[in-house]
Amino acid sequence: MKKIFGFFLLGSLFFSCDSGDIIVTSFDLEDRQLNICGLQTKVLYTTNNEDVYESMSLLINNNAIETEEGLLRTEIGQENVILSATNRLVYRIYDNEVPNSYFCSDIPPSEPQVLEEYISSSRGTIVINTYYRDLTNDADADGDGISNLNEGFNIDGGEHLDSDEDGIPDYLDIDDDNDNVLTRQERQNPDGDPTVGEEEYRDTDEDGIPNYLDTDDDGDGAPTRNEVNEENRLTPNLYLNPADVPFYLDRQNPIFLENEEYIENIIPARRIRTYITILNFSLIKQDGSGEEIKFDEYDLGYFDETIEENYSETEEEEDSEEVVEETEEGE
């Protein structure tokens, strides 16, 4: 990085504009996984401690950013933030290795010492693009242990499978058959129970329909949802008959509770990625020389996190081929 950076400075003698500006397109710190700290003001940063000690950090104070520690964004989509005194990019070269704690200290540390510093001017745009990382065939968006592909996810953006027709596609539905037993509980097959399909999903009544898609798991004529009482509807395996078998799996003792409650479809950990690009800006050397390095575009990098989402009705998502391709490249 240091040699490349020095080359651009030397090259300014030959390639600079009449104003003395230097045209640069990228640094070696570009397009990396970012670290984060801060609450109201976030610091996103990456460091390099090989050959030269350097860092690139972005400070953002904007209502597009979450104010909780360790979080960046919870909204899907693009947000543009204008570079300013409070939203700025900083590049530094140091005299020693840069520890991870350097950017998150309440009091600026005295070590390592900054040898050179460049700060963005108040022009340019921070483009913050947040998208789902779990919109691929192999991913498991709802965390139920069944891949998106096996739950009828259409990677081309067409219609997705919705087995219980509740408006929530199976790949985002934690209870695919709407029987008040979570899919991740119904797919499991303890104690050598009958199974169906190549994936060997549990099929208690051996009717060829896996429990997680069967509204009457034990085939006793009583719908599964009516054999799960309201108190234990999120832990149906605790609602047991005298033989310690859950009633919804007991073929001999049908129970009709007329349960009108429905499990709230909350996915606790949808995987998202926020990618940050900065457009049409300059970095100005902070030694009083006024030296300026201009950028058309700089791919700062990305930050990965998970968010909780509640699907109570059909959700429209950006699951086009373009988004999926971007996700796969960023894995």
Image: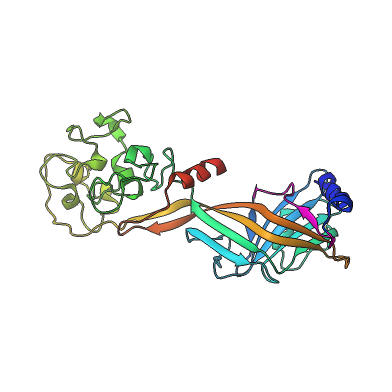
User: Which residue is pictured at 52% across the width and 45% down the height?
Assistant: 326
Residue 135, x across and y down, in percent: 43, 45
Residue found farthest to the top: 198
Locate residue 143 relative to residue 244 in the image: left or right.
right
Residue found farthest to the front: 18
User: Which residue is pictured at 71% across the width and 61% down the height?
Assistant: 281
Locate residue 9 relative to residue 119 in the image: left or right.
right
Locate residue 150 relative to residue 37 in the image: left or right.
left
Magenta stretch: includes residue 23: yes
Q: Which residues are magenta?
A: 18-32
Locate residue 245 relative to residue 169 in the image: left or right.
left
Q: With respect to residue 62, does 220 lie above or below?
A: above
Q: Is residue 98 visible?
A: no
Q: Nearer the viewer, residue 310 or 275?
A: 275
User: Which residue is pictured at 71% across the width and 58% down the height?
Assistant: 57
Q: With respect to residue 276, does 185 lie above or below?
A: above
Colour scheme shown:
rainbow
Residue 233, x across and y down, in percent: 25, 54
Residue 299, x across and y down, in percent: 65, 52
Q: In terms of secondary structure, what is the magenta stretch mainly?
A: loop
Looking at the rendered image, the quarter that the C terminus falls into is top right
Q: Nearer the viewer, residue 189 or 121?
A: 121
Q: Nearer the viewer, residue 150 or 238?
A: 150
Residue 29, x across and y down, in percent: 72, 49
Q: Is residue 199 visible?
A: yes
Magenta stretch: includes residue 25: yes
